[in-house]
Amino acid sequence: MSRGKIVMLNYEYDDLSLEQEECAKQGFEFAAGHCSTDDEFLAVAGDAVGIVNVYARVTPRVAEGLKNCKVIARTGAGYDLINVEACRANGIEVCYVPDYCVNEVADHAVGLLIAVQRKILQHHRNILAGKWDYQLVGPVARLNTQTLGLIGLGRIGRHVVRKIKEIIPTILVYDPYLDSETFAELGVQQADLDTIFEQAHIISLHAPLTPQTHHIISAESLARMRKHPFIINVSRGALIDLNALIDALQSGQVRGAGIDVLESEPDVPPALKALDNIILTPHAAWYSQDAEHETRTRALADVIRVINGEPPRNPAP
């Protein structure tokens, strides 16, 4: 007899045998589906005892409608899709996987940073167009003379510091939640946003999406950037006002960008595609085969733990 249904929502995986086999072994029925509205969510998962959520939005109405659900686990480090307060008010625990892809995202950020600043893709396009001339891309500065500004010094931000410090020694960091000892231990300079906007040649975003960080890169903040920096975002698309960034890239206020996440994703504005001074990747910074396996198994494991009456390993804060 089944112990109830565990549902995976808005997944991107071709093969769900990992979840199917584990649920069967634990005595649960497994189902999977996609939804884009509250009604669709409840139609697919309304009778679930547990949900593995990849990209579905959990609103207060959804939380109230999940009468049997004990737990929702997000297969990722961000949980802004889920109204945690509403879930817990309705007896639903919320879990996530905060550290499954730290190396992958840090590597991706460093890769984008170097590729954009060294104008590697522009060289590549020129060669494909039959133009063998390093000067076509314009001036390129020596990286170890540049100042890097990081916004956010969590797990990924700290890994970026450790990986990039040999290449760019001068690193300014804004993170209002850390004490001065953390900055000193990593050999970086604590700074406020104004200092980063005024002094950084490269700005890399590693902050969660909150009301305070929404559009932290805006028309107003872009106008304050004196060094015409390169901007890297492997965190959350809504940290950047995309229209403001497009305007800044077109005008030269921002020299270039490496962007893995968009507020409009998967829709990419034509004006962004037309730019020569940007590298775009499809929310891929997290991905490796190892990271995918880890986040799927850990999210499902926490779902089963909570249903079994055990505390989750990674409850959302």
Image: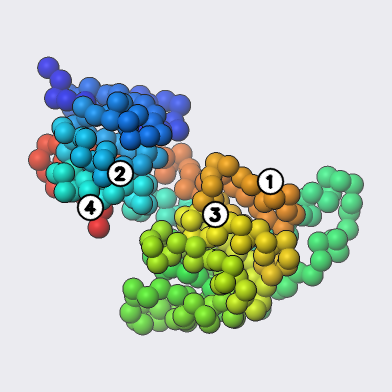
Image point (81%, 61%), residue name? 137
Between disc 1 and disc 3, the foreground one is: 1
Which residue is disc 1 drawn over? 270
SS for callout 3 = helix
Between disc 2 and disc 3, the foreground one is: 2
User: Which residue lies most toward the left here?
Assistant: 309
Quick one: label 1 or label 3, which is nearer the N terminus? 3
Give coordinates of residue 286: x percent, y percent: 47, 48
Check if mark 1's residue and mark 3's residue have beta carbons within 8 Å.
Answer: no
Point out which mark residue 85 bears: 4
Image point (62%, 74%), residue name? 223
Which quadrant is home to the C terminus?
A: bottom left
Which residue is disc 3 drawn over? 108
Give coordinates of residue 147: x percent, y percent: 60, 77
Quick one: label 3 or label 4, which is nearer the N terminus? 4
Q: CA distance from mark 3 to mark 4?
A: 32 Å
Viewer-proximal residue among 121 and 267: 267
Quick one: label 1 or label 2, which is nearer the N terminus? 2
Quick one: label 2 or label 4, which is nearer the N terminus? 2
Check if mark 1's residue and mark 2's residue have beta carbons within 8 Å.
Answer: no
Which quadrant is home to the N terminus?
A: top left
Point out which mark residue 59 bears: 2
Q: CA distance from mark 1 to mark 3?
A: 24 Å
Name the amino acid type tagged 1.
Pro
SS for callout 1 = helix
Q: CA distance from mark 4 to mark 1?
A: 37 Å
